[in-house]
Image: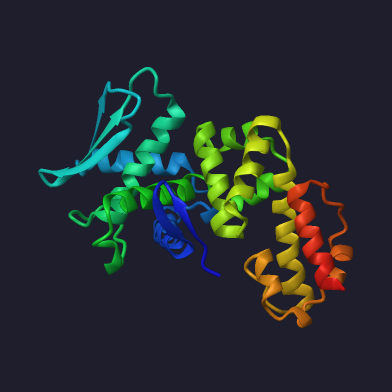
Amino acid sequence: MCIIINYRGIDVSTSFYNDACNQVLEFKIFLAKKYMVPLSLINWEHISEYMNELIKNQQLIVQSTNATDKFSGLTKFIDDRFLIIVNTSPKINNSRLRFTLTHELMHIILHHSELDLGFKIKLQPRFANISKKERELQADFAANDLLMSSWLIKDRMSKGYSFERLKDSFQVSWSAMQTRLHNYLVFEIGIDFDDARKLTNQYRYYNDKTICSYVAARDEFIHYFVDFCEIPCPPSIEDIESETINLLPVGGYLNHLGIELIRNDIENVLLNQLTDLAV
């Protein structure tokens, strides 16, 4: 199922989102091998170390400026090296600065090929003619995925992390964490855009961990279909209604799950769908 949503005035599809994340996966593998760490544990420290090596090798210059809050950073290729300019005004906290540096590095990885930085991605031809806004979105999606991996999100939310603890564990800002979670729910799980916004708002502002139960249940759902039913799990709950309904022993799923989901609007919808299919 291909989801298309209007994101910052641009129609964004799951394939567009996946393109950015798949491209950065190659970079993650490169960093994991370079620093001999598990792929899932790549974090800001490894990104920072790589950028410092580029600076030491005179392939990258990072220049700070004191600008208004609206400016975060930009990247240019000048005199055979990359120049990243970042806003380091007192109003810019370290979390935002880390994201900006990662975002600009993703521009270099995804959209520039002027210089060999020890890592060379096979750029997709379709990236050549995308708009400036689309390039910015790609860099955002890639930076989010690099700093906050899906695996760690699932692992920590399954353990019941609060929103604040989750964002602190990734060393990112409140807004960056919420944006990453929203994208994760919409593009990677297939939750409705507005429902995802409701879940993330409740998690951030009211410490409502319904979203954690949903993420944990989603993993159990996939495990049930793959290991017990020996058939692929549908990519989203909505697809269950249109794919091989008669083949899915959904009635046994709730018993297998062994947990009682919190009865709120979102999960009532989920339970109703499963109950309807089990009849």
Q: Is residue 53 above or below residue 13?
A: above
Res 87 → quadrant: top left
Please indicate whether residue 38 sits to the left or right of residue 52 in the image: right
Please indicate whether residue 111 sits to the left or right of residue 262 in the image: left
Point out residue 181 in the picture as x, y percentages from the top left corner. Answer: 57, 46
Please indicate whether residue 110 sits to the left or right of residue 232 in the image: left
Point out residue 251 in the picture as x, y percentages from the top left corner. Answer: 86, 71
Point out residue 66 in the picture as x, y percentages from the top left corner. Answer: 27, 21
Point out residue 277 in the picture as x, y percentages from the top left corner. Answer: 80, 72
Residue name at image x 31 percent, y 53 percent? 109
Quarter of the picture containing the C terminus is: bottom right
Please indicate whether residue 57 sits to the left or right of residue 49 in the image: left
Q: For the view shown, which residue lies furthest in the left direction? A: 79
Instruction: Please state which of residues 127 and 65 is positioned toward the viewer in this rendering.
Output: 127
Query: What colour scheme was applied to this rendering of the protein?
Result: rainbow
Quarter of the picture containing the N terminus is: bottom right
Instruction: Please state which of residues 269 and 157 is positioned toward the viewer in this rendering.
Output: 269
